[in-house]
Structures are given as C-alpha cells and as structure tokens.
C-alpha cells in the first residue's frame, strides 16, 4: 500500500478522493483536509466522493475547498453497496488516480472503496496511513496494556476480545455487551453491580482508575452506558480519567468520540481514530477490504 505522497508528479492529474463525510462530522472532515490540500498544492484537480446519510449534499459543499469538485451522493446508486463493477468503472472514468481517505468506511466492500482501485493507480490518503500506523501499535504494545471495550454490538467486539486475550494484560468489558460475555478468563473484568443497568457506577469508575494508573498503553472503544439516550455520566468520567492520565491512550468509536468532543478534551489523547467499526475490524483482523484493495 502506497501513500499519495509517493505518487510522483500530480500536476494536471484528476484525482478521485473517497472521503467519509457521511454524518457531516467535523472531525472526519478536518482529518481528510491534509490530503486534499496536498493534492491541490501539487497541481492536481481534486474530485471528492462520499455518501451522505443526512441526504443533503448542498450542506456538505460548504466544507469543500475552492476548486474542488464533489460528486453526487454515491449511496444514491445501488451499485455502491452491491460493489457493482459497472458503477466502479463509472467512478474511475472521472479520474487518473484514486485515493482512499475514508478509513472509517474501509471495512465495507463498496464500489467506491474496493471497486475503483481495480481500474486506477491507487493510493492511501495521509490520514489513512496514520490510522494504520497508530492502530498497529496495539499488535505489539508497551506493557502493561489495558483494553477497554463498551457499547452494544457484541458481534463486533467479541473477535477483538478473543484476539487480544493473547496481547493485552487486562480487558475491561462494559456497556450493554457486558451481559453477553461468557468467556471466563482472569484477564477479563466487568462492571460491578447490575450488568443490565443503563450506565456504569462510581465503584466501576474507581476500579478503572486503578487499572489506568497501572497501565502504560490503553485502547478504548465504546461507551459504558446507553450513551445515545442520555446515560453519559460514567462514559464522560472515564474519558476525563483517561485524558488526565498522561498515559498513551488510543480511542475510537462514535459515542466515544462524541464524549471527548463534548468535553473538549480531544487533544489530550495520543490518537483518536476516525473509525468505529473500521477500527474494531482492523484491530481484530489486521487488515480491511479497503486496505487490501490498495495493495
């Protein structure tokens, strides 16, 4: 996999950049800009492709730097999600070079993620390369290494637990997934009290603070409570404890990001991934369909 910074002369080239601006998320948009600015400064004509969950591409256009073209919502074409070769060729025909700057979408086999690279010289964006580099540290981490998992989707977290039992020193599992955990292992700890509660509790946070204090490297993905319905207290307390720990902390996931953005502590973490499901899949498998398409 090559970075766009290794592409050579870009002057006059049309470059199709797949970004993930789907939720109009300022964090993801801002992290895609260095790639766009690099291309523009090297004389390329930039064409952006994204889907738009909010269904308002006009609102997205205000984020687009001057001189950059943005395509219609790729999700409007059924060939996107079905990974249609016809749609991939149609997208590829708009450019000379392809860049994937949508790490957060790269666990999905969409035409604009895995189809287009079959027809164009293809590269990873600047942030995409950084995502892989920073997240890969979890495969050979400093010790003691603490893995913190929360949220509600057990099917995305269980492969991670099974893999990291051999790597992490401790794994804490909270949120709704805690009640589904059947693996018995001394490395795994759960919240105290009722595992079906809508949030964690003060005792659980105090236990976690001790684990954080005794760790050198920490990865966190997923809230401790039903964050989206307002049970935010203990997720926020965990976020603040990690932010003030002076430890190496990598975080990711939608509700996790929302918590640290709301607390205005984004810059206190070693690395904040743009990916939720993509981060989990990459940590579990060491690759993603979007990565393999660039190789």
Image (cartoon, rainbow, N blue to C red):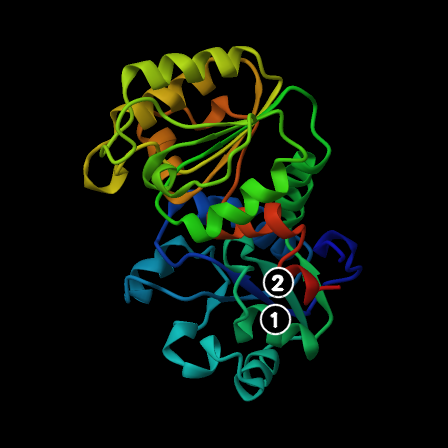
Q: Nearest the camera: 70 or 224?
A: 224
Q: Residue beneath label 1, please? A: 114
Q: Earlier in the sequence, mark 1 or mark 2?
A: 1
Q: Are marks 1 and 2 in contact (CB under 8 Å)?
A: yes
Q: In the drawing, does residue 95 fall left or right of residue 194?
A: right
Disc 1 crowd rating (10 Å Cα; few below 14, some 14-19, many 20+) is many
- The label on residue 146 is none
Q: Position of residue 158 (x, y in %)?
A: 50, 46
Q: Nearest the camera: 184 or 263?
A: 184
Measure how far apart labels 1 and 2 are at the Cα level: 6 Å
Q: How many circles with numbers are drawn on the protein?
A: 2
Q: Can residue 286 be seen at all in this image of the molecule?
A: yes
Disc 2 crowd rating (10 Å Cα; few below 14, some 14-19, many 20+) is many
Mark 1 lies on a secondary structure that is helix
Q: Quadrant of residue 58?
A: bottom left
Mark 2 lies on a secondary structure that is helix
Q: Residue beneath label 2, please? A: 290
Q: Which quadrant is the C terminus positioned in?
A: bottom right
Q: Nearest the camera: 53 or 141?
A: 141
The residue under the point 54% across, 75% down is: 111
């Amino acid at each position: 996999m090559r970075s766009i910074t290794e592409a050579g002369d870009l002057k006059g080239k049309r470059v199709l950049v797949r970004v993930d601006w789907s939720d109009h998320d300022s964090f993801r948009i801002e992290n895609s800009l260095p790639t766009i600015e690099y291309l523009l400064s090297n004389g390329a004509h930039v064409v952006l492709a994204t889907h738009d969950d909010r269904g308002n591409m006009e609102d997205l256009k205000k984020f687009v730097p001057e001189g950059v073209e943005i395509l219609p919502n790729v999700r409007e074409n059924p060939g996107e999600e079905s990974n249609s070769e016809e749609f991939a060729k149609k997208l590829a025909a708009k450019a000379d070079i392809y860049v994937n700057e949508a790490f957060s979408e790269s666990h999905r086999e969409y035409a604009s993620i895995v189809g287009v690279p079959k027809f164009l010289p293809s590269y990873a964006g600047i942030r995409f390369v950084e995502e892989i580099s920073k997240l890969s540290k979890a495969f050979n981490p400093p010790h003691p290494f603490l893995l913190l998992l929360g949220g509600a989707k057990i099917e995305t977290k269980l492969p991670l637990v099974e893999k990291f039992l051999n790597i992490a020193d401790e794994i804490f599992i909270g949120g709704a997934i805690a009640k589904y955990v059947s693996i018995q292992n001394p490395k795994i700890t759960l919240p105290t009290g009722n595992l079906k509660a809508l949030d964690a509790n003060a005792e659980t946070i105090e236990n976690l603070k001790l684990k954080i204090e005794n760790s050198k490297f920490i990865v966190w993905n997923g809230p401790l409570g039903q964050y989206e319905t307002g049970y935010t207290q203990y997720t926020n307390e965990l976020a603040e404890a990690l932010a003030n720990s002076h430890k190496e902390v990598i975080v990711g996931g939608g509700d996790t990001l929302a918590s640290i953005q709301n607390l205005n502590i984004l810059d206190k973490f070693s690395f904040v991934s743009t990916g939720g499901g993509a981060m989990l899949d990459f940590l579990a498998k060491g690759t993603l369909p979007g990565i393999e398409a660039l190789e």
